[in-house]
Image: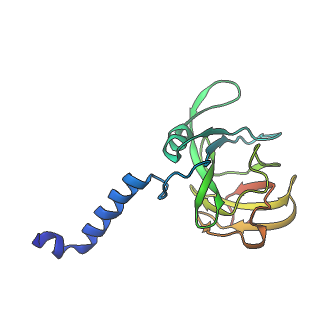
Amino acid sequence: MRDVLRYPSQLLIALLLATMSVVGVSGQAAAAGEKHCVVALGPASTGVPVASCYSTFAQAMRAAQTTDRADGDPLTSVVIGIDYSSTGFTGSTLTWTEPAGCGSYSASSMPTGWNDVVESVQNFNGCGTTLYQNASFGGLTSSVPVNGSKSSLGSLNQQASSQRWCTANSC
């Protein structure tokens, strides 16, 4: 017991990990109707991105680590960003992956069921992103810096219709 009181930060970390294992990997309890989707982009991505959706965030993260491309070949992928349907990184998730980390990628429209849905964003693996109000990169924008996050897109909440990723703070 003395060790626990001597190292309160370790106790806090242990409690946080225990809570995450009970609540879920995403830090929230799975709500009815939530979906957790994954899209594998490519440098030459065209058309509407195809999302594979799962009932839990943990299942989506497992799928994001190895994704089948349209040609059927499996590959190891890297998460470059996660879009959330609610502010504060909650709700349904849309995880974007690439085979080798950040580069120059784009989705001229959101996957089915994700148009005008996104409210918060996190970037990873050296990527920045810009979300656009309209399909094909038009209208108002909201940029999220490299490896940064926004807990709310503000006036662009539930209005994003296309998105770009790059190694800069604005794409």
Say which of 74 and 116 sits in front: 116
Q: Which residue is located at x 44 percent, y 52 percent? A: 24
Q: Position of residue 5 (x, y in %)?
A: 17, 75
Residue shown at the point (13%, 70%) measured from the top left = 3
Q: Nearer the viewer, residue 169 or 130?
A: 130
In which image quadrant can residue 67 be found? top right
- In the figure, is residue 135 to the left or right of 151? right
In the image, residue 162 lies at what x, y percent?
A: 80, 54
Q: Residue furthest front?
A: 32
Q: Quadrant of the C terminus?
A: bottom right
Q: Is residue 88 left or right of residue 58?
A: right
Answer with the quarter of the image where residue 49 lies.
top right
- Please give the count of numbered marks on the rendered protein: 0
Could one spot residue 71 in this view of the protein? yes
Residue 43 placement (x, y as % from top left)? 74, 42
> Is the N terminus in the top left, top right, bottom left or bottom right quadrant?
bottom left
Left or right of 4 on screen, residue 106 = right
Residue in the image at 62% along x and 47% along y: 33
Relative to 51, residue 21 above or below: below
Residue 19: percent from left, percent from top: 36, 59
